[in-house]
Image (cartoon, rainbow, N blue to C red):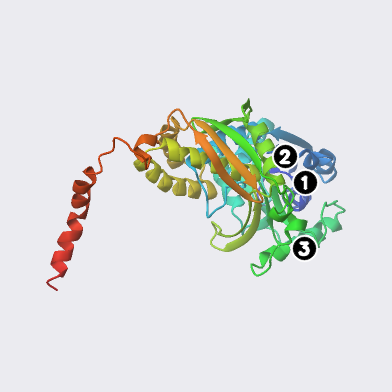
Amino acid sequence: MNTTTVKKAVLAYSGGLDTSIIIPWLKENYGCEVIAMAADVGQGADDFEGLEEKALATGASKLYIIDVKDELVNDFIWPTLKAGARYEGYLLGTSFARPPIAKALVEVARKEGADAIAHGCTGKGNDQVRFELAAKALAPELKVIAPWREWDIKSREDAIDYAEARAIPLKLTRETNYSRDRNLWHLSHEGLDIENPAHEPNYEALLKLGVTPEAAPDEPTYLRLSFEKGIPVALDGEKMAGVALIEKLNALGGANGIGVIDLVENRLVGMKSRGIYETPGGTILYTAHDALETLCLDKESAHFKQLIAQRYADIVYNGQWYSPLRVALDAFVESTQETVCGDVNLKLYKGNVTTAGMTSPYSLYDLDLASFGESDYNHADATGFINLLALPIKITAKQRAWE
């Protein structure tokens, strides 16, 4: 029996393996009331079917289902997209979904007068850090319970044994026990055969959001995305809110085999891990946003923004969303996005996204200057430019001639 006094805990609940067994474990080891909270981050309606019945049957006193999809898109996805943040090629789908879930968890805890929150993240993973840093920023007075860092369960097989011993129904078997995380932006797959980097994944059996490039249509799909200040606002001329736009792009991208990556990444805790990520809509949006920035940003701002993008990605990946540095970087990013407005045409074909033309009222591309045809550009100006640029090289060469 745990000796820490906890009267009421709010658990971030999904109904999956880990959180299903945490409810009875908390009651058995802390003797506290357990309230379950499920955040709707766009994982799909099927995930919530029968969820309340299951939560109550396993010992929760009630279940909250909180819709945070709009908040996820407007307050987390769009800022990350505008920053151009990527972590080792990963588009941060799980990373930026954790802070809004933690925020909802804290809000329910305060509403219920709870003295603790709990989560099902393992001690090996990144998500424990993301949840807990957000919680400490938003409600440092709340105790955080992380059962994977306390209990005797050592593996997912042990967790299944624990569930079966208490007649807790599961939507998986030992043979299909992949660890998956799904939200509006992406779907990740880890575990089982994927853990060995030497194995090629069975994509036909694995993928849920789309098809393999080989199975994609033989004809390309064309679309047009419109941006205002770095934010996508319309598809093929039709104004769309963020959630609906991402859902539509997921469907289009998935059908064309877009956005699947096999990644061995460096986890925050130090180890490497392998995952398969499906991010069809996000891949399309990043491609379009990157392309539009090439038209609208000056050279120095664009190059410095690339440095910012890497640091921003590290902040999001490491769970430091609620940090002064992220807020400060947002101020820089926002200033660069004032002119990132316009239309980008894209071609989707068998796993590839390519640009097919773009326009912007703020385009810095001067056709007269760039053209190989006759223009007002004075070619003779290049002579003095080259001489000055070469001056330190010439001085160094003369010095070395004496060596």
Q: Residue at x 76, y 49 (%)?
A: 16
Q: Given the image, on which type of amino acid does mark 2 rest? A: Ala
Q: How many residues crowd around disc 2 within 10 Å: few (fewer than 14), some, or many (20 or more)?
A: many
Could you say where residue 372 lies in the image, as x and y percent from the top left? 37, 43
- As drawn, 357 above or below 178: above
Q: Earlier in the sequence, mark 3 or mark 2?
A: 2
Distance, label 3 to label 2, CA atoms, is: 24 Å
Residue that numbered label 2 is attached to: 38
Residue 322 makes an appearance in the image = no
Could you say where residue 68 lies in the image, as x and y percent from the top left? 66, 34
Q: Earlier in the sequence, mark 3 or mark 1?
A: 1
Residue that numbered label 3 is attached to: 157
Residues at badges 2 and 1 in contact (C-beta under 8 Å)?
A: yes
Q: Given the image, on which type of amino acid does mark 1 rest? A: Gly
Say which of 199 and 236 sits in front. Answer: 236
Secondary structure under tag 2 reads strand
Q: How many residues crowd around disc 1 within 10 Å: few (fewer than 14), some, or many (20 or more)?
A: many
Q: Given the image, on which type of amino acid does mark 3 rest? A: Glu
Residue 15 - label: 1
Q: Residue at x 34, y 42 (%)?
A: 300
Distance, label 2 to label 1, CA atoms, is: 8 Å
Q: Residue at x 71, y 49 (%)?
A: 218
Say which of 212 and 187 sits in front. Answer: 212
Q: Earlier in the sequence, mark 2 or mark 1?
A: 1
Residue 87 makes an appearance in the image = yes
Say which of 369 and 179 sits in front. Answer: 369
Secondary structure under tag 3 reads helix
